[in-house]
Amino acid sequence: MKRVAITGLGIYSCIGTCLDQVKDSLYKGKSGIVLCEDRLQYGYKSALTGFLKEPNLKDCLDRRQRICLSQQGEYAYLSTLEALKTAGIDTDYFEKNPVGIIFGNDSSMQPIVETCKKMEQEHDTQRIGSAKVFQSINSTVSMNLSTIFKLKGVNFSLSAACASASHAIGTAAMFIRSGLQDMIICGGAQEVNLYSVMSFDALGVFSSMQQSPQKASRPFDRDRNGLVPSGGAATLVLEDMDKAKKRGAKIYGEIIGYGFSSSGGKITEANPESEVLAIENALKDSQMQLSDIDYINAHATSTQEGDKAEAMALYKVFGDKMPMVSSTKSMTGHECWMSGASEVVYSLLMMHNDFLAPNINFENPDQETSKLNLITQTCQKQTNCFMTNSFGFGGTNAVLIVKK
Amino acid sequence: MEINEITQKVKQFLINEFEIEEDKIYPEANLKSDMGIDSLDFVDIVIIVEDIFGFRLNTDDLKQISTFQEFCEFIQSKTKK
């Protein structure tokens, strides 16, 4: 079985639009959360969101390439450009080698809403134009990037709610392990426009702490009262370790474990037993001992039930061997379909810069979260191995383990 | 509408909406091979022509047209009706 190297990484998020900015934000414990007035006017119960600068791609892409990209596709284009740069890969490489793409994405609301509005006004499909279909279907990110970068390998998107990107990375790793592909661009993307999470807001699971946006995302804190939606895109380049070394690529890390499970319960219910199963599956796959895990980037989104279930699951698995734990969602909010990939990027940045970012806004534990070894202040620490958790609606769980 | 006015209007939307360089737009220029317009672009051209000239092109019409000049003359023939 082949080993899976991470040879490229890129990020476009609310705490920075490149790796250097994001590294600084993580170190400083900087929040990217704002209150969005447009969401308030539109009728959201909670208008808290990660804020992202809208890209201007006019100098990078031609008209056809630009108009077919959804918002999250634009973010993913930029994170992928950065990932390819760090990997030392250019379009010439794609001409000679069949590189694949597997991206996590589970919605594309804006073009769908705009298309419906157009139809309600004009009742004429011709007036929709040529681009909306390519923006609105769920594979919008992988289909557009594969076209832009002229990729010739495996090409699909993966939808698994908030575990989409983790499963995309895990699936890409399996393709490489098996030798079916030597290199795959993978990651996750999440839209943040006005329409992106309105049906999510209906469930009442967003934080109501609108008076203090940067305090609202407080995973594991006793007084947490809901998640803060966010988005952007994160990209990894995964590669056959031997071939990566042969071409002299920088190795940022190795994917050594992928675990998954389904809770088989209610559609929104967090289930500690199934989370334990996913974590144990990842540990077994990685052949690591509990004490080998230096850091856990938790799924914890700042909801009462979700964080409680994860704290219980982590305690069940690790007990008194609990590694240091934080949820970078305390700074970024919940990046949903993107989160599994961004949290690998965040953790790699910490690992390569010998620090662990704080779980900001953690002030008081509750009964379950008191059993975690939570990082409340940035700490200087060398780490060699981390775990990231992603748990989504429908009980889809994915866990990745990465070592230096 | 006079052919010169049509030509100017078509030229402007090809430059502004389709980002075609001005020097690629001349009477004998082939819409596909010289100007790079493809079948997806025609979907959007139908909308723009309808908004500017007030009639609906259909894709069969466009299959009969090769050059910029033919395209402008076709529009003139439709606007005269």
Image (spheres, rainbow, N blue to C red):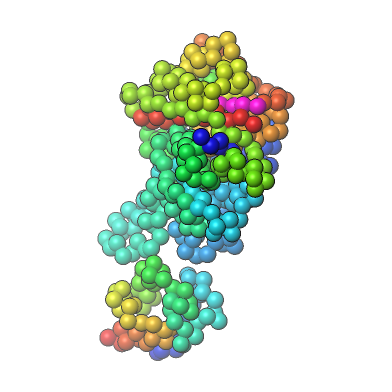
In the displayed structure, B76 sits above or below A289; it is below
Kindly tell me whether residue A79 is visible in this rendering. Answer: yes
Viewport quadrant of the C terminus of chain A: top right
> Residue drawn 54% across and 14% down?
A318
Span of residues in magenta: A384-389
Main secondary structure of the magenta stretch:
strand
Name the one closer to the observer, A195 or B15: B15
Name the one closer to the observer, A24 or A39: A24
A266 in magenta: no
Question: x, y percentage for residue A350?
Answer: 66, 32
Q: Is residue A120 left or right of residue A327?
A: left
Corner quadrant of residue A365: top right
Question: x, y percentage for residue A347?
Answer: 61, 32
Q: Is residue B12 left or right of residue A93?
A: left
In the displayed structure, B69 sits above or below A311; it is below
Question: x, y percentage for residue B13?
Answer: 46, 75
Kindly tell me whether residue A330 is visible in this rendering. Answer: no
Corner quadrant of residue A218: top right
> Residue drawn 58% across and 15% down?
A322
Question: x, y percentage for residue A134?
Answer: 40, 56
Corner quadrant of residue A403: top right
In the displayed structure, A231 sits above or below A214; it is below
Name the one closer to the observer, A299 or A196: A299
> Residue drawn 48% across and 70% down?
B18
> Residue drawn 57% across and 47% down?
A79
In the displayed structure, B65 sits above or below A45; it is below
